[in-house]
């Protein structure tokens, strides 16, 4: 039940905000929007204002907006999508992913401003111990204070890395203080290819630091940049076959959302911010039926100086829809098999 409710919240927020971006920009450039809906399926409530129907529907898994003139055969609709300048159409297409970037930034800002930020404590006291790593295998525990490694006394957290690096994977004697006792442990550092160095699998303790308005804005921007760069690098590695693609469908996302929700609202909001960036970046891929694919079509029309024929657009979109449906089906089956 938790996974279902969390999944509804996550998909509802992400898709509704995305569609809200298209809706607001379409209105801003003077396009006719026939309907803006929250949810799908049977209509629960509807009102109308300035030619646009606003509806609330039964299935709360997102939403949609219907912009006039976007469907084949509607190209001549007054104030429709196709009648507006190409720059206006480009802005409308990009507005959805823009809102997803904005949503992520707003969530990160709110979290930093309300809950502050976890900062590492620069003293040799162990925080998280990674399971299956040398420190855990040697019996080190959270809260242990490392007094020395290989005979070298430690004064701050960064001393741990420098001493381990010098040892180059050799077995070392670690002296710790646990409560009022001093204990000696034998640890063999392990080379971690991703980090390109020897490690024992420990993290420092963290403490909360309150942030003001300016710092909250700064760290929100930094968090969004770091995650975006990481996602783009991940896509690059997949394209160049340096990494394999791990597909997760709606069921998998809902399950993850349920697990995250059990950790608290802050964790769920962070998850939504992360997925919002994910949705934005994936939507920018030049795949027909995605925003990136539609934007590419507009670029082609701009270079050609005329719109593509309706049949050609329909064919391109059909290929894109088929590809996305096949990918979603594959990911869903993969989720079920797991």
Image (cartoon, grey):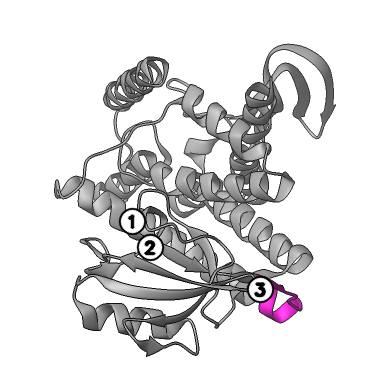
Marks 3/2: CA distance?
18 Å
First in sequence: mark 1 vs mark 3: 3
Marks 1/3: CA distance?
23 Å
Residue 80 placed where, x, y %?
56, 34
User: Quick check: can you spot residue 288?
Assistant: yes
Q: Residue at x 41, y 15 (%)?
A: 336
Q: Residues within 10 Å of mark 2 (few under 14, many from 20)?
A: few
Residue 99 placed where, x, y %?
59, 51
Residue, disc 3? 217
Residue, disc 2? 229
Q: Is residue 166 left or right of residue 67?
A: left
Q: Secondary structure at mark 3?
A: helix
Marks 1/2: CA distance?
5 Å
Q: Are marks 1 and 2 in contact (CB under 8 Å)?
A: yes
Q: Is residue 54 left or right of residue 19?
A: right
The image quadrant of residue 6 is: top right
Q: Is residue 45 left or right of residue 335?
A: right
Q: Residue at x 64, y 60 (%)?
A: 108
Magenta segment: 207-216
- Quarter placement of the C terminus: top left
Q: Nearer the viewer, residue 182 or 31?
A: 182
Residue 289 placed where, x, y %?
38, 31
Q: Nearer the viewer, residue 287 or 274?
A: 274
Q: Are marks 1 and 3 in contact (CB under 8 Å)?
A: no
Marker disc for residue 232:
1
Q: Residue at x 67, y 59 (%)?
A: 106
First in sequence: mark 3 vs mark 2: 3
Residue 261 placed where, x, y %?
67, 38
Q: Secondary structure at mark 2?
A: helix
User: Quick check: can you spot residue 79?
Assistant: no
């Amino acid at each position: 039940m938790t996974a279902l409710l969390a999944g509804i919240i996550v998909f509802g927020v992400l898709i509704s905000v995305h569609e809200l971006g298209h809706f607001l920009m379409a209105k801003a450039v003077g396009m006719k929007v026939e309907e803006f809906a929250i949810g799908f399926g049977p209509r629960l409530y509807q009102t109308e204002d300035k030619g646009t129907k606003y509806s609330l529907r039964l299935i709360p898994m997102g939403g949609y907006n219907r912009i006039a003139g976007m469907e084949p055969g509607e190209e001549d609709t007054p104030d429709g999508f196709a009648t507006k300048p190409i720059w206006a159409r480009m802005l409308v297409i990009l507005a959805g992913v823009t809102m997803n970037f904005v949503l992520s930034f707003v969530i990160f800002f709110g979290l930093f401003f309300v809950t502050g930020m976890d900062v590492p404590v620069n003293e040799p006291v162990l925080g998280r111990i990674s399971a299956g790593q040398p420190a855990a295998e040697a019996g080190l525990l959270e809260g242990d204070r490392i007094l020395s490694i290989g005979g070298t006394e430690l004064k701050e957290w960064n001393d741990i890395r420098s001493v381990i690096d010098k040892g180059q994977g050799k077995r070392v004697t670690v002296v710790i203080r646990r409560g009022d006792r001093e204990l000696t442990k034998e640890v063999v550092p392990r080379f971690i290819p991703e980090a390109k160095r020897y490690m024992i699998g420990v993290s420092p303790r963290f403490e909360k630091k309150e942030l003001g308005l300016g710092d909250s804005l700064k760290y929100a921007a930094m968090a969004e940049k770091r995650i975006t760069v990481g996602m783009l690098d991940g896509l690059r590695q997949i394209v160049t076959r340096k990494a394999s693609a791990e597909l997760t469908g709606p069921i998998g996302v809902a399950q993850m959302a349920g697990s995250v929700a059990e950790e608290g609202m802050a964790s769920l909001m962070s998850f939504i911010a992360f997925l919002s960036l994910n949705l934005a970046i994936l939507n920018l891929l030049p795949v027909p039926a995605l925003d990136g694919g539609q934007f590419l079509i507009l670029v082609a029309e701009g270079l050609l100086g005329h719109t593509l024929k309706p049949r050609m657009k329909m064919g391109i979109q059909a290929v894109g829809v088929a590809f996305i449906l096949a990918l979603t089906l594959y990911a869903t089956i993969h989720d079920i098999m797991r």
